[in-house]
Amino acid sequence: MLSFVVRRIIASILTLVVASFIMYVLTANSGNPLQDLLASNAPNAQQLIGQRTERLSLDVPPPLRWFQWAAGAAGCLVPFASCDLGVNLNFTPVTALLPGAVASTVRLVAASTILAILLGVITGIVSALRQYSAFDLGMTFFSFFLYSLPSFLAAVLLKEFIAIDFNNWLSGADSSFGLVPTIVITLVVAFFLQAIVAGSMKNRLITFGVSAAATLGVLLYMDATNWFQSPGLGPVGLLILIAGVAFVAVVLVTGLGNRRALLAAGITGAIAYAAYFALQGLFDISTIWTIAILGLATAVVSFAVGWVLGGNDRSQVIRVAMITGIVSGLLVVADRYLQAWSTYIASPRINNRPIATVGEQTVGLTGDMWVMGLDTFTHFLLPTIALTLISFAGYTRYARAGLLEVLNQDYIRTARAKGLSERTVVMRHAFRNMLIPITTIVAADIGALLGGAIITERVFAISGMGSLFAVSLDRVDLNPIMGYFLVIAVTAILFNFIADLSYALLDPRVRVK
Amino acid sequence: MTTTAPTDDQRAGESQGRLILKRFSRNGIAMVSLALLLLLFVFSVSAIGLGPIPGWWKHDYVTPLPPAEGGRPTLSLIPEWLGGAGIMLGEHPFGQNRIGVDYFAQTMRGVQNSFLVIVLLAGVATVLGTVVGAIAGYYRGWVDAVLMRITDVFIVIPAIVIGAVVGRMTGGLGVQWLAITLGLVAWMGIARLVRAEFLSLREREFVEAARVAGASDMRIIFKHILPNAVGVVIVAASLIAAAAILLETGLSFLGYGIRAPESSLGLLVSQNQSAFATRPWLFWFPAAFIVIPALLINFVGDGLRDAFDPRQRRFSRRRTKEMPQAEALPAVPAEQKS
């Protein structure tokens, strides 16, 4: 094991050195870094050219210049050594440019990655369980379509249709749903849900009817209360949602037969619901740290509830309690954000046009944590959707193929043969084994994420890693490009390594050598 | 794995190639996609011609013409008896861009360039990847180690990053050079797949037999092992082909790929995204012609995968009924739940 790790590290360093050399020489030859000065009419252009040439050693041929760069960059990989990645064309140190870009990119890609994994895996599982049903074929077609959809098309379409149309609708005189959209939404939701449930015609019809009625009710309620102007879950809505979360958590993890799990979920949900009323005053003066502490408290309390009520199958009951507690906590926080919505859209900077199409925040907007949080949300909403759509397709296919493969294994047949319920077979025997290959894919994907979404960042004018790269490439600004490369290459190598190790840890059949 | 256990397809004792062809041609979606793809290719090439050969379309993709009807598209697909203007192309079926250039010609030129990029990029990447993977997998040892480390080096640099740098260097040289250079940095996936395939195939008896018979290494690699690994290669090539469209249009969108006055679908979208509200057709036509070929290639690739890998083929209830002892049995547990 130790020799594996050491050999891997040495190989990775060599890879990094050679790749950086290739990248350096290629980039240096992609254009002339003096271009803007050569074309300028400034009286001191000659002097500026000389200054830049001297400061960036442009008179040294690129292969040799790489050694200068590597000498400084080597310090960044060794702990406690001074880190020198050079300066850009304006003589700003690259080490000062990178943190901001990394932060923007993480904010952009983190949510979309989590969403894509969650939605993709869930859809993939449902597709696999309903193999060759209408839902499966529809999802297969949809994911193929997403595979073929370039990210810039998705981004431009979202901007044009979601942002502008939604804003027009919200700021327009009549912001109600109207008859036709209400009917269409109801039918689509109901049709979708009955396709997921599948089974006999009777089951489908019941699902269709119930979900259509529920959707229609929700839509009419939203219409009547002018929901998009002053949204909120409200005490009743929150109660229904928390109860739903507790129910789903119990059904998925243990099944309704388990009294202890049902009780634990009920108690955790009740605590979360009580906290909703108790915390409103505290929320008004909250900072992000208050929320973090509350989140920690939620986790501890749910864990304790599960522990106390656990009995014989403690780990499962703890899992039920924690899922219920944390999701309910998120709902309570989401409700507080929704309460701030009317303040947010009414502020003069927003003026009822909340969904932003460019940038990371509204210039000049002031407000408490909730309003600023909503501002970030509206700015990152569209790029997050665009990125989610693109990576969603891959996870769906992986999850579907993975689950089908696992379901064909002998141990699944054994599990069925000894009379386990379908839920136990799928959730405990199949689902966990399916997660092994997904874990490694996720680890490798996260490693590639920091590269940023060059195209999405361009379309939405977000100054993350991708736009740092694109802007620098336009100017043949070598040092920022190499700084960018160093960050993404090191994370990619690191996470690939983690992916390999996690595979070996999760799957005893695999041994690293 | 084309030499898997016998399946119910092997009743007639046909060759592997024929079986695969048969399985593929039975796949309706894949066949229709392939036909449409070829049709689109012929249509785009014949419309504006190729090189010195003129096409049947009257306008070219660079000359500005006097704008007619505000540059609106004249294409009409609704027949007269349904209240439309009748099925016709008109003077400018896709409209005209801001300076009056015929948009149909520009889009068709973009489609043509897409096909050129697909063929060259996927071709270069496939050949290079196959050769590297085959040599690494066949010789193992230090040859394998060196080649795989080189592969790692190229994998570390993300495709779009190296594509952007390479595209910036060669974008001005013309579409074919852009495509070939991009192919030189897109071969790593195929190399890994082919290597894995070779590592297992080289231990088989038929390789040993060939070696005993005195075949040279090159002969064993290309005549004996490669035909058995061709399934992996073709499926991976189809995936690269679909990715090639997205890479080229993405780079052209960013301004690192194909440049004006040459036409690329990504470039057209990028040039006209700001005119979306006033002249939406300038956006929709190139957008559709990016998505459609990519989608068709993905369907063809999926069909090829099914055809080459009969273990994962589509499950058909009817076939299991006809042949109760068929190999399709493992698929049954997953099927029972639906």
Image: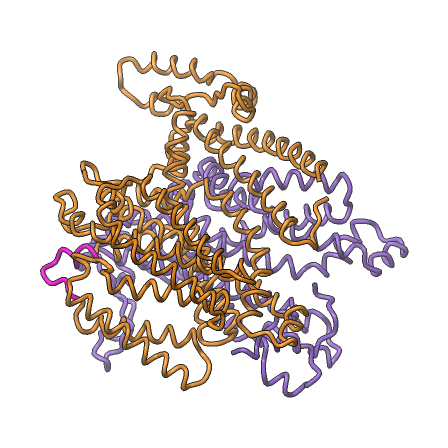
Chain colours: A orange, B purple
Q: Position of residue A495 (x, y in %)?
A: 55, 42
- Residue at the location (70% across, 65% down)? B2
- Residue at the location (15% across, 42% down)? A349
The furthest residue to the left: A173
Q: Is residue A441 left or right of residue B1?
A: left
- Residue at the location (35% across, 21% down)? A90
Q: Which residues are magenta?
A: A165-176
Q: Is residue A362 left or right of residue B219?
A: left
Tag count: 0
Residue B52 seen by the camera: no
Q: Position of residue A510 (x, y in %)?
A: 69, 52
Between residues A91 and A394, which one lies in front from this camera angle? Answer: A394
Magenta-colored stretch includes residue A168:
yes
Q: Quadrant of residue B313?
A: bottom right
Residue B94 seen by the camera: yes
- Residue at the location (75% across, 78% down)? B13
Relative to B308, say whether A457 is above or below.
Answer: above
Q: Quadrant of residue B153?
A: top right
Between residues B101 and A75, which one lies in front from this camera angle? Answer: A75
